[in-house]
């Protein structure tokens, strides 16, 4: 009986909540949409991958999810996505700014193109700014809400990604802090998530490798051994920040990196022999 009660309570962690997820048609966004819906939320997926988006909605169920086309670099489309969520469900409780891209890796800054740099920032940073802006527009009158954005381990360390990607993720953290200070006076929490490398369509496509190859490479350089980071781990972290368990957490950058960013592996400290 106690087990049933606990399971029911867990299943209701987002009961009655309405969430908008950008980049919701694949990868972390898709996984998070599924987790949020499992926990009782009404989920609006926003993406430019229309076929995938509609497929995810069919899989989750139209009673719990819907799809809206949204290019996060276009303010009118962000505004429309937020307005559609409110028109459909009457409110917006959770905004997850998850849409992101990367550019081709070019190790020399002299070889990097201005257009590529600006394209990454337009999605990864300006898109987050617009998401926060229009979520705030409907959350401020309600005096509540949780805004979450996807950053990266590249928000803390250098040489883990391209110049544009690294810059964009550092900036997301700064924007998160500023927005948390401003919007906190209205009861709105603003946080971001910083995952270590994991197999998503964006990552495998940009690196030109498959899921297994990416995970093997990530595990080789990971600090925490014996665990492979999955999209579900990021979704569960988003679930925590979205729900009432994190009701006093704001302005925080939550690392899901197994301790990767806290150590410099070149020091080789605390290294046990291979046969231990």
Image (cartoon, helix red, strand yellow):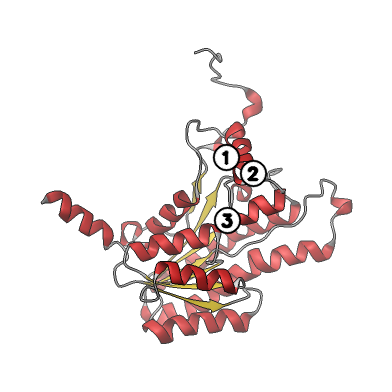
Between disc 3 and disc 2, the foreground one is 3
Query: Which comes sooner in the sequence, label 3 or label 1?
Result: 3
Q: Is residue 249 visible?
A: no
Task: Report the side of 68 relative to 267 (left or right).
Answer: left
Q: Residue at x 51, y 37 (%)?
A: 259
Asked whether residue 110 is in view, the answer is yes
First-in-chain label (3 vs 2): 3
Please state if 130 lies on the left or on the right of 233 as rendered: right
Q: Is residue 252 above or below residue 12?
A: above
- Identify the residue position indicated by label 2 in the image: 157
**Cβ atoms under marks 2 and 1 closer than 8 Å:** yes
Q: Are marks 3 and 2 in contact (CB under 8 Å)?
A: no
- Using a 10 Å C-alpha cutoff, classify the residue at mark 1 as few (fewer than 14 neighbours), some (14 to 19) or many (20 or more): some
In the picture, the disc for residue 261 is: 1
Task: Tell me the distance, in whole angstroms, between the alpha carbons under discs 3 and 1.
Answer: 13 Å
Can you tell which mark lies on residue 151? 3
142 and 5: which is toward the camera: 5
Measured as percent of width and height from the top left, residue 231 is found at: 50, 51
Q: Are marks 3 and 1 in contact (CB under 8 Å)?
A: no
- The secondary structure type at the circle numbered 2 is loop
Image location of residue 140, percent across then percent down: 42, 79
């Amino acid at each position: 009986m106690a087990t049933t009660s606990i399971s029911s309570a867990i299943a209701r962690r987002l009961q009655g909540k309405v969430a908008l997820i950008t980049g919701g048609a694949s990868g972390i966004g898709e996984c998070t949409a599924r987790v949020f819906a499992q926990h009782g939320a009404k989920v609006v997926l926003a993406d430019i991958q229309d076929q995938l988006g509609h497929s995810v909605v069919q899989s989750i169920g139209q009673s719990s999810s819907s799809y809206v086309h949204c290019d996060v670099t276009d303010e009118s489309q962000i505004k429309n996505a937020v307005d559609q969520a409110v028109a459909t469900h009457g409110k917006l409780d959770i905004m997850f700014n998850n849409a992101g891209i990367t550019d081709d890796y070019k190790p020399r800054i002299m070889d990097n193109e201005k257009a590529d740099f600006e394209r990454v920032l337009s999605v990864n940073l300006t898109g987050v700014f617009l998401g926060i802006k229009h979520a705030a527009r409907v959350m401020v009158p309600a005096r509540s809400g949780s805004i979450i954005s996807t950053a990266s381990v590249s928000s803390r360390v250098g040489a883990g990604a391209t110049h544009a990607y690294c810059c964009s993720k550092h900036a997301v953290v700064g924007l998160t802090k500023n927005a948390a200070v401003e919007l906190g006076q209205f009861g709105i929490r603003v946080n971001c998530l910083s995952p270590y490398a994991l197999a998503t369509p964006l990552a495998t496509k940009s690196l030109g490798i498959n899921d297994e190859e990416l995970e093997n490479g990530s595990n080789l350089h990971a600090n925490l051994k014996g665990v492979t980071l999955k999209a579900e781990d990021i979704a569960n972290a988003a679930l925590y920040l979205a729900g009432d368990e994190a009701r006093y957490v704001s302005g925080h950058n939550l690392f899901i990196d197994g301790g990767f960013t806290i150590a410099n592996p070149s020091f080789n400290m605390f290294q046990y022999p291979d046969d231990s």
